[in-house]
Amino acid sequence: PKYNLLVLPGYGFDDLQWCTKTTLCEKAKRQGFNLIFIDVQKSLYLKQFFPQTNAMVKKYPTRTWIMDTVVKKLFEKKYLTSQYKTFVLGLSTGARGAAILLLENPTIFSGAACLSGDYDPTLQKEDPLMIKALGPYDTNKGNWLGDNNITLRAKEFKHPMFIAHG
């Protein structure tokens, strides 16, 4: 491989749908990408859970778990090496995950592609998923405006990111 690509699915999507329902895998292989798929099921890519976080949300991995338990271990075991640049790609909530993983891990990821994601939970304060994750906005503004709000952290990005929504 020439590159590594961590591929993040959307909420409730099968982790291998990128291969079974698109041409991503065959095109990536031709371009020299080593693809990494993680079965995160319904992750909202939070850094950690809050006291207000619903038990259903707590069943699924945080971005801390993704990095510490999966990505960093792959580097430690030499399945991934810094010899090849590593990128991250996500769809929907996976796009949210891709953006925030890039932002918080600039020494691991060199860029991201984020397709149809949302990056500012305050734009949809009645979103049931965000309420289950962060608690109701009116009583938990700090959770909504904190480190899970990618838009408010935009100046922290160190690497390029492609964002598309259609």
Image (tube, rainbow, N blue to C red):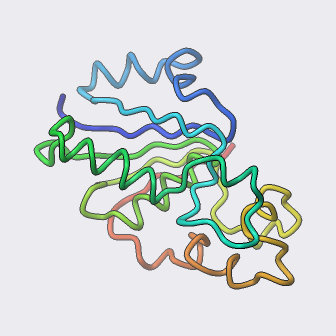
Give the answer, above or below, for where 89 lies relative to 104. Answer: above
Res 46 → quadrant: bottom right
State the residue at coordinates (85%, 73%): 136
121 left or right, relative to 36: right
- Work out which quarter of the rendered image holds the N terminus and state it: top left
Name the spot of residue 22 as percent of width and height, x first: 54, 19
84 left or right, relative to 127: left
Of residues 117 and 80, the one drawn nearer to the viewer in this rendering: 80
State the residue at coordinates (20%, 35%): 79
Number of marks drawn: 0
Name the spot of residue 64 as percent of width and height, x first: 45, 60
Name the spot of residue 17 as percent of width and height, x first: 57, 23
- Work out which quarter of the rendered image holds the C terminus and state it: top right
State the residue at coordinates (40%, 46%): 88
State the residue at coordinates (52%, 23%): 16
164 left or right, relative to 65: right
Give the answer, above or below, for where 42 lies relative to 34. Answer: below
Residue sticking out furthest to the left? 83
Name the spot of residue 6 as percent of width and height, x first: 39, 40
